[in-house]
Image: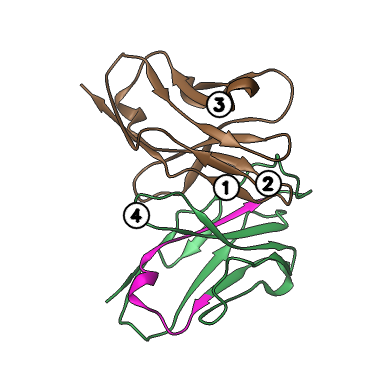
Chain colours: A green, B brown
Amino acid sequence: EAGVVQSPRYKIIEKKQPVAFWCNPISGHNTLYWYLQNLGQGPELLIRYENEEAVDDSQLPKDRFSAERLKGVDSTLKIQPAELGDSAVYLCASSPPPGKTYNEQFFGPGTRLTVL
Amino acid sequence: AQSVTQLGSHVSVSEGALVLLRCNYSSSVPPYLFWYVQYPNQGLQLLLKYTTGATLVKGINGFEAEFKKSETSFHLTKPSAHMSDAAEYFCAVSGPRAQFYFGTGTSLTVIP
């Protein structure tokens, strides 16, 4: 079974430029998460999807961040414009239905963003 | 509210020695607790989880953890460290809306 796929693995951009990250979850997993992981820290939730619906986006900085999950499968996370403080690893995770609190999350390898 | 505290951001043990990584949690609901491991430039991988039932949970790679409600702890142990155990370890608690709250992580170094 293929795992969670993320691309690109690494991205270097200049500040004020836009950037997008893509995530393909494990087949059949209807819950998808985007996390931000700063160096030396644990992951922090940005947004959670149940199918195509964003059910928790309270921590997403909506002035510059946006996300979509068309058709309830792949998802894209965008930052526009990027700031120096956005340099971090962006992790995507998915979990199988139902979206219970004890469900394991399966993580992708992450996209390491560097903003210069 | 849910939160996790991992005591010790860095732990070093000798190869073959006991590994003990500490995790304390706070939760307003019955907790579901998890330990994940992260190797360099990789995503997180589940080691073990506690949901209900037996409080001693066994996971992959010889790791286990014990849920102690009275101490609000979920410490991770392994009897004998191996070089391949060197990684970052994260404790997490799940919230009522299936969101996860992660600790700040503990970096484990294994000394040959």
Magenta range is: A78-95
Residue B68 vertical placement versus B98 (above, below): above
Q: How many marks?
A: 4
Label 4 is placed on what type of residue?
A: Leu
Label 3 is placed on what type of residue?
A: Ser
Q: CA distance from mark 2 to mark 3?
A: 16 Å
Q: CA distance from mark 2 to mark 1?
A: 7 Å
Expressed as whole percent of the image width and height from the top left, the position of residue B96 reads 73, 47
Dot 4, how many residues are within 10 Å of its Cα: few (below 14), some (14-19), or many (20+)? few
Disc 3 secondary structure class = strand
Label 2 is placed on what type of residue?
A: Gly
**Badge 2 and badge 1 in a common chain:** yes
Q: CA distance from mark 2 to mark 4?
A: 24 Å
Please tell me which residue is depicted at 37% across the width and 78% down the height of the picture. Answer: A83
Q: CA distance from mark 1 to mark 4?
A: 17 Å
Residue bearing mark 1: B101
Chain letter of disc 2 in the image: B
**Considering depth in this image, is B104 or B86 the residue closer to the camera?**
B104
Judge left or right: residue A91 versus residue A69: left
Residue bearing mark 2: B95
Expressed as whole percent of the image width and height from the top left, the position of residue B36 reads 50, 38
